[in-house]
Amino acid sequence: MSYKNFPMVPKVLFGRGSFNQINDVLAPKRLSINSPFIFLIDDVFKGNTWLLSRIALAYDDRVIFISANEEPKTSQVDNIVEDIILKSKERPSAIIGIGGGTLLDLAKAVSIMLTNDGEAKDYQGWDLVKNPAIYHVGIPTISGTGAEVSRTTVLTGPDRKLGINSDYTPFDQVILDSELTKDVPKDQWFFTGMDCYVHCIESLTGTYLNAFSETYGNMALNLCKEIFSENNLSEVDAQEKLMMASWHGGMSIAYSQVGIAHAMSYGLSYLLGIKHGIGNCIVFDYLEDYYPEGVSLFKKMKSEHNIILPKGLCADLSDREFDIMIDVAMSLEPLWENALGKYWKKTITREKLKALYQKM
Ligand SMILES: [Fe+2]
């Protein structure tokens, strides 16, 4: 048995309004006046002076607005990297991602690809990155994905949806300011929050579970219950607690693994472009055979918050399209092994997965 030597985010700033300190955090990291800070920001913040006016741009610093309507792609990473190289006199001092999982994952991937040759798709997998990334900062504006703390950056590539998992992927600095999440629309709040909930269920019921993962998973799960089920928190409390649930949920899977909902949701996302949070919800809703307690509470929370999930997504798919989704899902072997043990292939067949997808 070989144990993972797992890197963690070395510096964290936490607190309501802590985003105000961004310029002080960044200042010592400037390598030269020709080496800019590049801010990758979710384009929902375009024109949002409440947020943008607090970022002090100097020299060649740039803000690049990016839509998070689609899951991040390897080609998108390559394009951003090329644009940064073309327009910068020197290699950037820092990449700062401000947004949800999509923006955070893009910031991580861009910071890696600025110091590593080739294309982002070449690094999808485990421990393929050779050189340390550029200093990178993550500032979540929605909570749940755990992208702020994880050792991966999940990208859709030409051949697969898979993360760049490496010791160089985690952020060097994270700023957790729950005030930045105050305007998240309710549906998105639920879907992304449920990503965290599903992380907890998949980790806590998995065969990879250990005391490290379990303690973080339990903390995050209890926070999720307080936020989504007990409903007696103030808005500010709920925002702060969800931010910490996301963090702990991410820490829990860091030392274990996710499971069936994630594997199948990657299939949906690869073929149909379904976003991660809602994709997990769509899949998890049908997994009562595998996660009975988790799914029953999920259904309760879903109805308490009047969340309607789309239906009939797979109604008109061809056999070939089902095969593509099943291939993507089944290729994520560690996820299945975590969920069902070493001999998961005895329980999980292509026909079973097809029958599940057909319901969605
Ligand atoms: Fe997730």
Image: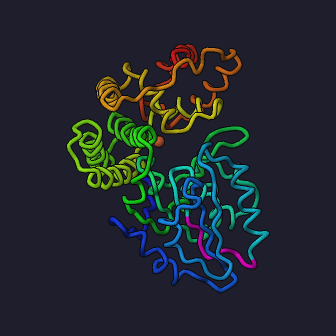
Residues in magenta, as a range: 89-96
Q: Residue at x 27, y 46 (%)?
A: 223
Q: Residue at x 55, y 77 (%)?
A: 56
Whether residue 57 appears in magenta in the rendering, the answer is no
Residue 300 visible (yes or no): yes
Residue 301 appears left or right of 7: left
Percent coordinates x, y for residue 144 in the rendering: 41, 47
Residue 105 visible (yes or no): no
Q: Residue at x 64, y 75 (%)?
A: 61
Percent coordinates x, y for residue 40 in the rendering: 60, 62
**In the image, residue 8 above or below residue 145:** below
**In the image, residue 241 above or below residue 53:** above
Q: Nearer the viewer, residue 167 or 156?
A: 156
Q: Nearer the viewer, residue 68 or 273?
A: 68
Percent coordinates x, y for residue 222 in the rendering: 24, 43
Q: Nearer the viewer, residue 83 or 160?
A: 83
Q: How is the image coloured?
A: rainbow
Residue 266 appears left or right of 225: right
Which of the 4 image quadrants contains residue 290?
A: top left
Q: Nearer the viewer, residue 308 or 92?
A: 308
Q: Main secondary structure of the magenta part?
A: loop
